[in-house]
Amino acid sequence: MIAEPLLSLAVSVAAEHGVQGVLNTIVRGLAAQPHVALARIWLVSPGDICNSCFMRAECPDHTQCLHLTASAGNPANSPGEDWTFLQGHFRRIPLHVRKVGEVGATENPILIKDFAPENPWIARPDWARREGIRSFAGHPLVFQRKILGVLALFSREPLSEQDSTWIGIFANQAAVALANAQAFEEIARGEEALRERANLLDLTHDTVFVRDINDVITFWNRGAEKLYGWTRDEAVGQVSHHLMQTIFPAPLEEITAALNSTGRWEAELIQTRRDGTQVVVASRWAL
């Protein structure tokens, strides 16, 4: 295993911002390396198909297991086999079970430098014999002391300790890229939820606006536009204190003190629109 291609692959993986993109780039890049027969990634996730799982009888804990999420390889003597298929016998592997499950449970890498197909670690000796598999390397994907999954590689040539070291270094970089991609997707889901919430708030007849910890307005619904006369584009980004001075007759210090003490402030006020007209409004503020 040559270091330079792995470093180049790590750069390509880091450029991906989606979880599946990261996973696919990893296994495809590894499968493209000389002598690599198969590369796979399993991620730790809650148990989900326990009743139909091929490895149910071996599973000591049905709460979580390793889910096969990416696979790529180069069949040599297995016509018709699709090594990208994710729903086969090893789609779920219990922690502490088989070599991949052991890596996931202990977070320790496993290297089998050279083995005969009858090696007890090999679950499919007929497949290993047919494909000329000689070696296996399994490495944990760990980020900030949390196990994310397992990276496994089957080679048609013996792997050395140095090869395993380079694969381990790559696995560490891959774990960082995976954690970043998971964070990106979580942020995207949060933003989508906020957009959906904003759409709902636009449908209400109430006036709703949101300010951040720096007193900057971050949301201004259609009700606020109609009541006060400032559009969303004009209001968002303004310092709330400055804008509210033109609207509220109540001292902002009084509102701030109430929010700090009870988290709420309510009153009926005569509020001034942007055009100078006034309206009586039941005003409620909350943290």
Image (cartoon, rainbow, N blue to C red):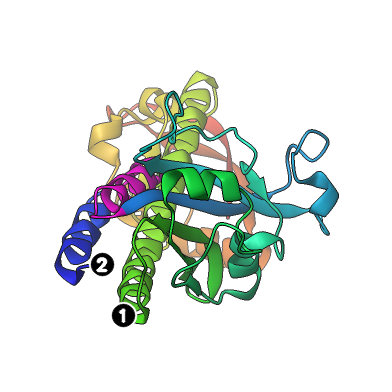
Q: Which residue is mark 2?
A: 1
Q: Is tag 1's residue or tag 2's residue first in the polypeptide sequence? A: 2
How many residues crowd around disc 1 within 10 Å: few (fewer than 14), some, or many (20 or more)? few
Highlighted magenta segment, given as a residue range: 17-35
- Residue 242 lies, in percent from the top left, at 29, 54
Disc assigned to residue 162: 1
Above or below, 145 against 186 in this view is below
Where is 119 relative to 193, above or below? Answer: below
At 44% from the left edge and 29% from the top edge, which residue is drawn?
82
Point out the image quarter for the N terminus.
Answer: bottom left
Amino acid type at circle 1 is Gln
Q: Quadrant of the C terminus?
A: bottom right
Q: Quadrant of residue 18?
A: top left
Measured as percent of width and height from the top left, residue 231 is found at: 28, 29
Examine the image and state in which quarter residue 264 appears: bottom right
In this rendering, the answer to whether 29 lies above or below 86 is below
Could you say whether the residue bearing mark 1 is in a helix, strand or loop? helix
Which type of secondary structure does the marked residue at label 2 adopt? loop
The amino acid pointed to by label 2 is Met
List x then y, in percent, for residue 199: 46, 24
Answer with the quarter of the image where residue 53 lies.
Answer: top right
Q: Gap in Å between the C-alphas at discs 1 and 2?
A: 8 Å
Q: Is residue 25 magenta?
A: yes
Q: Foreground: 174 or 192?
A: 174
Say if mark 1 contacts mark 2, CB within 8 Å: yes
Instruction: Judge by depth and name the residue closer to the eye, 210 or 260.
Output: 210
Q: Residue at x 46, y 59 (%)?
A: 151
Q: Which residue appears at 31% of the width and 80% of the height? A: 162
Q: Percent from the top left, x then y, of residue 56?
A: 81, 45
Between 85 and 279, the one lying in front of the other is 85
Q: Is residue 93 magenta?
A: no
